[in-house]
Image (cartoon, grey):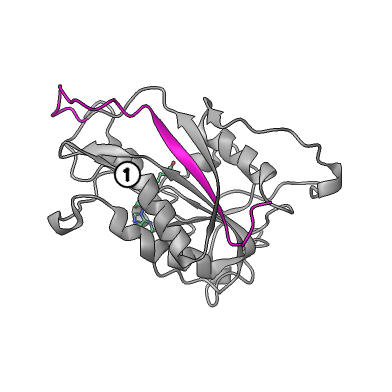
Amino acid sequence: MNNEGIQGVFPTMATALQPLSQPAKGKARSEKDTAYSPLASVWFGDDAELIDRLLDFYPRKRPRKILDATVNGGRFWRGSKRHVIGMDVDGRHRPSVVADNTAMPLRDGSLDVIVYDPPHIPNQGRDNKKDFGARFGLVLRSPKENQYTFTHTFPPFVREAYRVLKEEGLLLCKITDYVHHHRYQWAHIELISAAREVGFMPCDCIVKIRKGPIIDPKWKTAHHSRRQHCYWIVFRKSKKCE
Ligand SMILES: C[S@@+](CC[C@H](N)C(=O)[O-])C[C@H]1O[C@@H](n2cnc3c(N)ncnc32)[C@H](O)[C@@H]1O
């Protein structure tokens, strides 16, 4: 087991943790031998390919300590050679560390990148064909006092993310707006507001096109457009983006 990416991150449990993937073999990338290649603001491929591009594009130097703070089954890292620590509050997904991302057992300023893909679409009906609950952790319940949304989880998460990231570190968030109880839920706006509040600089936004919309099977007719995209928002723990 190679714990290279874990050392210095966890105060007490470094040796007990398994990385999700092994570090890339061979020479580390340096800024000098990387040619600039522009990145389009609309992405039609899958998340894993996009994350790989983001991790080449935005960091000022090759990121070594990467945390997926909502790792679930680790779909973002399939086929990846990057060394990633996977965190999830639900131990059934067998993450590297079982923890709540609003109270992470990590040192201040210990990470280069955090990836975040929070649950969305609270309290939805079951779509047996797609089984979103089991695959994506989408069926956590949200109480009425939180307007049935998960946006109340953003402020404690971004505060923690800010604490554990190094200066200039990146927070990459996949966020989906959705319609719930016949109301548009502006999740990406809520996230940006919460992140700004704790000091993050929102630096970029990529629209990722989904193959098909997520449709609550209970509602055949809804006078809102079907969500067929989500956003990847790029934040930097910095006063500037470039
Ligand atoms: C949408 S899924 C992530 C899917 C993952 N990106 C993938 O592609 O496999 C959200 C995950 O966040 C986890 N989660 C929810 N609240 C959390 C918290 N407070 N701390 C850590 N993980 C949490 C859920 O257990 C679920 O596995």
Q: Residue at the far bottom: name it.
A: 12
Label 1 Cα crowd, 10 Å radius (few <14 / some 14-19 / many 20+): some
- Residue 224: % across, % down: 23, 28
- Depicted 14 relative to depicted 45: above or below: below
Task: Find residue 98 and report its horizontal and vertical position in percent.
Answer: 41, 62
Q: Is residue 19 left or right of residue 94?
A: right
Identify residue for label 1. 186
Quadrant in which the N terminus is drawn? bottom right
x 62%, y 62%: residue: 239
Stretch in magenta? 216-242
Q: Position of residue 162 (x, y in %)?
A: 51, 66
Up/down of 156 relative to 121, above or below: below
The residue depicted at 20 percent of the width and 31 percent of the height is 216
**Residue at the (57%, 35%) spot, across then down:** 50
Q: Main secondary structure of the magenta part?
A: loop
Q: Position of residue 137 (x, y in %)?
A: 31, 45
- Residue 27 in view in this figure: no
Q: Nearer the viewer, residue 94 or 222?
A: 222
| Left or right side of 5 for 182 | left
Q: Quadrant of residue 155?
A: bottom left
Disc 1 secondary structure class:
loop
Q: Does 235 appear in magenta?
A: yes
Q: Is residue 5 left or right of residue 210?
A: right
For badge 1, the amino acid type reads Trp
Residue 200 sits above or below residue 105 on the image: above
